[in-house]
Amino acid sequence: MDPVLPEEPTPMSLLAGSGSEMLTKSHVTAFSHLGAESPDKQTLRAPRLNLLFRKFQFIFYASYHCKKDFISMLMVCTMSGARRKLALFLCGCYVAALGVRADVHCVAGAECYVAAVYEHRAILSPNPLALTSREQALELMNRNLAVYERQVMTAAQQGVQIIVFPEDGIHGFNFTRTSIYPFLDFMPSPQLVKWNPCLEPRRFNDTEVLQRLSCMAIKGEMFVVANLGTKQPCHSSDLGCPDDGRYQFNTNVVFSSNGTLLARYRKHNLYFEAAFDTPPTADHVTFDTPFAGRFGIFTCFDILFFEPAVRLLRDPEVKHIVYPTAWMNQLPLLAAVEIQKAFALAFGVNVLAANIHHPSLGMTGSGIHSPRKSSWYHDMEDPEGHLVIAQVPRNPLGLTGTENAANTADPAHAEFLKILSSHLSCEKDAQEVRCAGAAMPDADAPPAFHAEMMYDNFTLVPVWGKAGHLQVCANELCCSLLYERPALSGELYALGVFDGLHTVHGTYYVQVCALVRCGGPGLDTCGQELSTAAGLFEFHLWGNFSTPYILPVLLSSGVTPEAPDRLGWERGQYFLSKRSLSSGLVTAALYGRLYDRD
């Protein structure tokens, strides 16, 4: 019998003899609520069939205005022995027809997996400083978790195998230590306790959020990475135990596709988060997957520090990073997608980064970044969240290596190598850095000036001509630029250098070479926050860095992350080159970190 197609949102039974699944006509991406309560074991005996029903539900919605013949055939085939393959095939066809697709980062013949990140506009507490009950806290968190569930089921239609949600996306932010307490789940150690919260909901108290995330992983048949606040009792014998007798942590959790709690990471580098404690020792957390091998995990501000981010990557098996963040953009050097892409480039890994979405607070920018390509989202206007899906290479191909540095087929690169071969040397006296060598920068280069960028006192020189070779130095670092411009855009650009301790919004030592667009025609506008530009460049940017830890930053108009053409070390200089930008240059920078000087 053909199914009845309701003109209005009338419930109907789809699966006679197999239990009733109630559907209403709705937007194709609005799936039925999965429920806040943990399902019993009978419900979860066949999660794959449950997911298939939801895939069928999606097809039904998409097919609402299509011929009933197709829907009848689909129902018959779904109930047949070949139901899964055919239903998934038809589902894939319909998803493609609707324009929902995954970006492709993989080259032909490469092994790939499908990943998703969701930039979530969190429903926030109207007064995070006020005391509340656990029941009230759960009511708010369940509203955010309901959005997560819908995104998991949407991602399931694309065959997503792992999804990442942002930092603070479930509970929000701006709490005190006391006011956040009702929002905290108890967190056992996955290294000590094997636990499936969805199937064992009563094993521990105050674990409602963990239970719901675990059930999402089962229903979606995917790994789920999320961030929440957790609590852990401690005793007075523990010298680090807070006065209230408990630790409170900013925590990432990872659930496998069967709902098992697989990993826990507690944020090490807190960013003005009075509600949380720093773990007694840094967590170095990895987890293995059947589809992509080993992942590492850390949170937000951690990305700028050695512990745990860089130390994790000393494990050669870690080729993927999952990265929940609540990042406030700060141009020209530290926009969210800018730093995410730079980390992927610097370490030759895939970065799956989910940011929270509150444009009024400068918080947007998520992406799936491989060294050679990015699928990203940055929107300061749209108030809604956004799901990014991409096919990702299991073994990412980096840009660094001798093959990039040694290729002299490009005339601009040959000129760069010629400059380096002149053995240009620099010495520091009491007043300034003086450089000597056969290939000096332009003799008529404009004089240097100083301007504040990212709260640091940069030394800069303006970039005025259509082509040239400029150099600017500070302390131990000299930065050089070899450039050519197809046309002058009327915008002022400058080459800047900073070598010192950054002390605002965190204290850490940086060496930076940066080519930036200035805010106006005046030199005092260089270093201002801008997101658009028209100026096109072909350039090499390099410096004599004192650290191997350098994040290559390349951003074009519209906060668009770009990949360099070449990147790496050449004769003691670290360089970045680019010939064809997709749009005007906002920032090109080499952001070096000297962790031992923090």
Image (spheres, helix red, strand yellow):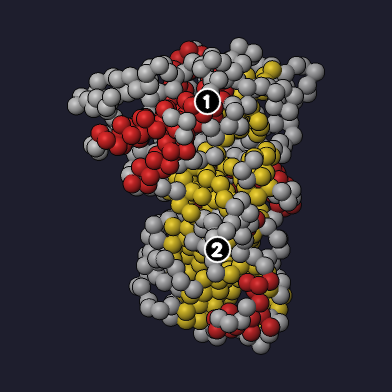
Q: Nearer the viewer, residue 509 or 10?
A: 10
Whether residue 386 is visible: no
Whether residue 309 is visible: yes
Quadrant where the image shows the N terminus: top left
Q: Crowding at label 1, few (<14), some or many (≥20) Cα neighbours within 10 Å? A: some
Residue on which disc 2 sits: 589
Q: In the image, 353: left or right of 395?
A: left
Q: Nearer the viewer, residue 99 or 356?
A: 99
Q: In the image, 504: left or right of 153?
A: right
| Residue at x 52% of width, y 71% of height | 578
Describe the element under mark 2 as helix, strand or loop: strand
Looking at the image, do the residues carrying marks 2 and 1 touch, with CB atoms under 8 Å apart? Answer: no
Mark 2 → mark 1, Cα distance in angstroms = 48 Å
Residue on which disc 1 sits: 47
| Residue at x 49% of width, y 40% of height | 159
Q: Mark 2 belongs to which amino acid?
A: Ala
- Where is residue 359? Give x, y as percent: 39, 42
- Where is residue 503? Give x, y as percent: 60, 48
| Residue at x 36% of width, y 73% of height | 489
| Residue at x 44% of width, y 22% of height | 34
